[in-house]
Image: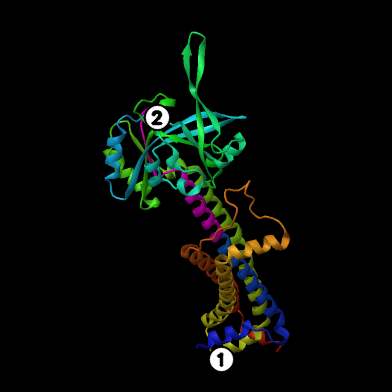
Amino acid sequence: MSFETMVGLRYTRAKRRERFVGVNSAVSMIGIALGVWALIVIMSVMNGLQNEIRTRILGVASHIQLLGEGGRLADWRAVATLAAAQPRVLAAAPFVDEQAMASARVVRPAQVRGVLPAEEARVADLGRHMRAGSLDDLRPGAFRVVLGEDLARSLGVFRGDKVALIAPQGTVTPAGVIPRLKQFTVAGVFSAGMPEADTRLALIHLADAQVLYRMGEDVTGVRLKLDDLFAARAVAGGLQPKLPPGVRAVDWTQTHAAFFHAVEVEKRVMFIILGLIVLVAAINIVSTLVVAVADKQSDIAILRTVGAAPSSIVRIFVVQGMVIGAIGTLAGLVGGLLTAANIDVIVPAIERAFRFQILARDVYLIPELPSQIQAGDVAAVVLMALALSLLATIWPSLRAARVNPAEALRYE
């Protein structure tokens, strides 16, 4: 161990008249530890939220949609066969996507999706979220519907009840335009955990949707499921040149771009805001070292007179500052990882202790706080804390190196 490191470590500990330096060092360590802890926990929770919401959205939506021009795709079977033959594509399923009004005891807006149950189960996870009935109950010509849980509740219907779907396209008669409607039997109810789906989505058989909206053999498009959802943009870009004219490939990063962009922006802003905690603690290291330099002027002068170079003096106080930063960072790292890894236990305990719910089911997309620790985020937090600690040592260390031995020892 070099003498600079030895002296720097000794200066970190307080003795007698230097006790204020030791207290200030402890406060700096605590500040850095709190900042690192908060950053790791918040970043992990936001990663978990983003992943959970993405999973729920893509359980209802799709990785890629192949859409026809004007909302109509004629030769969809050829398009589906072409897409299914591409690498990374696991399944393809046609769909009809239209607006309607659902009428029972009350009238509610609905997003009607016509599907082939067997094919839909391969591209979406709605089958796993059924509360009553099954997607297999949707049969051509039976005019049955599967509703989102919140939509069924607002309509006041249960399995076996009747619901009228009113299409926006009317029928022109001598008496004027008459809305086109068809009565459906509720065959099931699902709860996907996504308000967008649970409050609006109504699933019917593809053939019934084609009849209701007079589409003949046409569909709105084809939905694709990939082996890796993060490859959606690359797969869509590679597939587009192979598609017939008028057919476009849209991946999930485009259909939900605004939402995920907002989450990313919020994550960056939270990193900056919480990073200010670490910055304030690093500034406290500056004050700690300034006081230490003023207190140790006679020691510095003696070291200089016995041959210590100015660079050695700089290294002594850099070591002192970095020890403070490293200990605080390590404590925050351990605490942050433990908290993030056990967030599913800690949050319910806090809710029970204080008798309030952190995430209300009727307000947020999910009722619990998930956590996902990512090595990249943890590394960024640790490196930022150590870098700020190092920067905080530069000015006080240079000031210590400029101490004049003669002036410092004049009154000793």
Residue at 36 percent of width and 31 percent of height = 68
- Pick out the residue farthest to the bottom: 306
Of discs 1 and 2, which sits in the foreground? 2
Give residue 323's position: percent from left, percent from top. 57, 78
In the displayed structure, would residue 297 be above or below residue 255? below
Considering depth in this image, is 282 or 304 the residue closer to the camera?
Answer: 282
Instruction: Name the amino acid type tagged 2.
Output: Gly
| Residue interval drawn in magenta | 43-70
CA separation in Å, label 1 and label 2: 86 Å
Inspect the image, locate mark 1, and give the three-letter code of the amino acid beneath it: Val
Q: Which mark is residue 383?
A: none
SS state under label 1: loop
Q: Tell me how the rendering is colored.
A: rainbow
Label of residue 71 in the image: 2
Residue under the image location 56 percent in, 34 percent down? 161
Q: Residue at x 54, y 47 (%)?
A: 193
The residue tagged 1 is 306
Sequence-earlier tag: 1 or 2 = 2
> In the rendered structure, does residue 409 fall within the stretch colored magenta?
no
Relative to 154, say whether 183 is above or below. above
Q: Position of residue 185 (x, y in %)?
A: 51, 33
Q: Quadrant of the C terminus?
A: bottom right
| Residue 370, picture quadrant | bottom right
